[in-house]
Image (cartoon, rainbow, N blue to C red):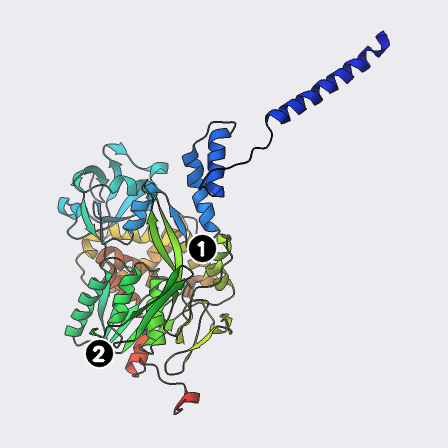
Amino acid sequence: MKKFTPTLLVLFTLIGVLIGIYISSDRHQTILITTPGANKVDELMQLVHHNYVDSLSMEDIMEKTMPKILSELDPHSQYIPAKDLEATNADLASSFSGIGIRFTIQEDTVNVSDVIRGGPSEQVGLMAGDCIVMVNDTLFVGDVCTEENAMKKLKGPKGTKVKLSVKRYGEKDLLHFNIVRGDIPLESIEAAYLIDNKWGYVQVERFAEQTFTEFIIAVAKLLQSNCEGLIVDLRGNGGGYMGVALQMANEFLKRGDVIVYTEGVNSPRNIDYANGRGNLQDIPLVLLTDEISASASEILAGTIQDNDRGTIIGRRTFGKGLVQQPFEFKDGSAVRLTIARYYTPSGRCIQKPYTKGDDEEYAMDIINRYERGEFFSQDSIHQNDSLVYKTGIGRTVYGGGGIMPDIFVPGDSAKYTPYLTTIINKRLLAAFTFKYSKENRSKLATFKRYQDIVAYMKENSAVEEFIKFAAEKGVELPAEQAAQSRKMLVEPLNANIIYNILGMLEHVKYINLTDETVLKAVEVLNEGKAFPTMPTDTAGSND
């Protein structure tokens, strides 16, 4: 009998395991989930909450789940956590609370690039060029000095105080400032002036709360200076409040003209018409666009184009034609949910194609357009021939991928040598011009026009000084690129210094001297071609 003992032992053990499995499966048999009124997601969350093996935070799980759910809908439906909502909304507000400076991070230090006029920093004597090294008596340099951390430390509720210790060029000791935070205005229009004493140029950076008011004031001043036509620059304008763009469009259109309409499965068609009260209905108009012009910018460009009201010059726009409506939760978080599509007056939706759930592909579209040469050749642009529309006078326009300009102006692919590309990528140009502005500010600050700074930079051989600076940082100028690079360095060096010393307006005036898109706009206005005309093949037709 002893020789059978191991076999019996194994047999009894196996029987015991099987009995245990049977008992276990019987005790934990599948349970039918029945939660009255709940959907499948609610039921899953409740199931995990009450039955999961480990302790967990349902709030954390929900915060991670919400973006994933919305990403399956479209690229622009978005979940915004409560901690980010204020900052997200602040981008389109007319003001924020802070100390009133613009800054850059140079060599792990906050460098003040501009002090906003009338703000708290100007009132206490902070100056452009100052380096902030301590905040509230705590060292703020090195790895901790990031843009995000700097924003957190410098922004704050109105009336609160912050102590800054700064290093100022030419001063031996640190300077200390106690600043009371206040409301800081955010301007959407920092550049508006006359070109050739008759063409008004207005750069619109965003569509925020006060943009329309700023625009009307800027144009009124231009008209008082005998402005004969307008160039509205929407390049780089990623959109904002659609209602503001509609107000602006209304200024240019006749009573009854369609501005835009929206429609979705759960959103009945809603049409916005011009009311005929606009003060700019007859002025020659040119709009400038590029691949960053998006959303509200595209609707403004689209309605001007479809109503044959003006000429669009530049490059094809981004292609965002989806309507988001904000919904807030009790905890302060929010969802911006796509509820409809925008349609221009001709009936086209300019939303570019997307694959649901593939945000990476959507985000890569701009890069793909660049790599296939679209920014430099009109022939590289892929228009959807199945989405062809006609304007009132019979011009052909396309849907399904942004606004194609009436006049295409390519980017200048020959503008950069490999040397220039390297110094820009390494941020050496920005670092040098900030250093140069700081060290020469006492002289540069006496100038009031960009022409004065251009003359000063040439006289003091700033290009050669930069080349030495770049070499010290490990980037030598190759002999075969020397002549071309020296010539090409002049404009970006001047432009940066002009911005640092005189601000955006003089900066824009200077770069527009050689901006091919602006020059083309001036040419169109000079030739009286701002108002589109009927295509030659349909001229005289009564159809």
Name which residue type carries label 1.
Pro
What is the secondary structure assignment of the residue under circle 2? loop
| Residue at the far top in the pictured view | 2
The answer for how far apart the CA atoms under marks 2 and 1 are is: 41 Å
Q: Quadrant of residue 289?
A: bottom left
Whether residue 292 can be seen here: no
Name the residue rendered at 71%, 22% in the picture: 18
Q: Name the spot of residue 10 as percent of width and height, x first.
A: 77, 16
Name the residue rendered at 33%, 63% in the picture: 296
Whether residue 378 can be seen here: yes
Density class for disc 1 (Cα within 10 Å; few <14, some 14-19, many ≥20) is many
* 443 lies left or right of 428: left
Between 293 and 328, which is closer to the camera in this rendering?
A: 328
How many numbered marks does the figure carry?
2
Between 141 and 40, which is closer to the camera in this rendering?
A: 40
Location of mark 2 (residue): 228
Name which residue type carries label 2.
Glu
| Quadrant where the image shows the C terminus | bottom left
Q: Name the spot of residue 309 as percent of width and height, x first.
A: 31, 77
Location of mark 1 (residue): 75
